[in-house]
Amino acid sequence: MMGLGMSELLVILLIVVLFFGGKKLPQLGSALGESIKNFKKGVKEGEDKDDSKKS
């Protein structure tokens, strides 16, 4: 996984928990998931526009 071992992932998780706090993590995860979904939707719409221009 991109050269990250288990110890590195645990350190990153610890830093995120310390920075955002335990109560904010569900909100952060939800916002991140929504952002990824919107990004994928935008990429797909961009590809659809490119396909329609080529025809």
Image (cartoon, grey):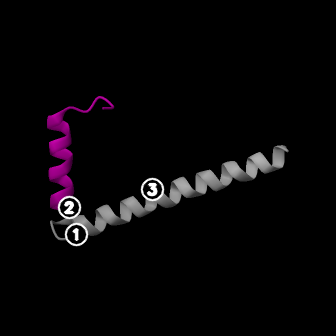
Looking at the image, residue 24 sits to the left or right of residue 32; the answer is left
Q: Residue at x 67, y 48 (%)?
A: 47
Q: Residues within 10 Å of mark 2 (few under 14, many from 20)?
A: few
Q: Which mark is residue 24?
A: 1
Q: Is residue 6 magenta?
A: yes
Amino acid type at image mark 2: Phe
Residue extending furthest toward the right: 55
Q: Secondary structure at mark 2?
A: helix
User: Could you tell which of marks 1 and 2 lies nearer the N-terminus?
Assistant: 2
What whole-number distance in Å separates the C-alpha atoms at marks 1 and 2?
10 Å
Q: Secondary structure at mark 3?
A: helix
- Residue 11 sits above or below residue 42 on the image: above
Quadrant of residue 7 in the image?
top left
Q: Magenta region, mostly helix, strand or loop?
A: helix
- Residue 5 sits above or below residue 55 on the image: above
User: Could you tell which of marks 2 and 3 lies nearer the N-terminus?
Assistant: 2
Quadrant of residue 8 in the image?
top left
User: Could you tell which of marks 3 and 1 lies nearer the N-terminus?
Assistant: 1
Q: Secondary structure at mark 1?
A: loop
> Residue tagged by mark 3?
36
> Looking at the image, is mark 2 or mark 3 nearer the viewer?
3
> Residue tagged by mark 2?
19
Q: Residue at x 37, y 60 (%)?
A: 32
Looking at the image, residue 35 sits to the left or right of residue 45; the answer is left
What whole-number distance in Å separates the C-alpha atoms at marks 2 and 3?
22 Å
Residue 34, image x, y percentages: 42, 63
Q: Quadrant of the N terminus?
A: top left
Q: Quadrant of the C terminus?
A: top right
Amino acid type at image mark 3: Ile
Magenta residues span: 1-19
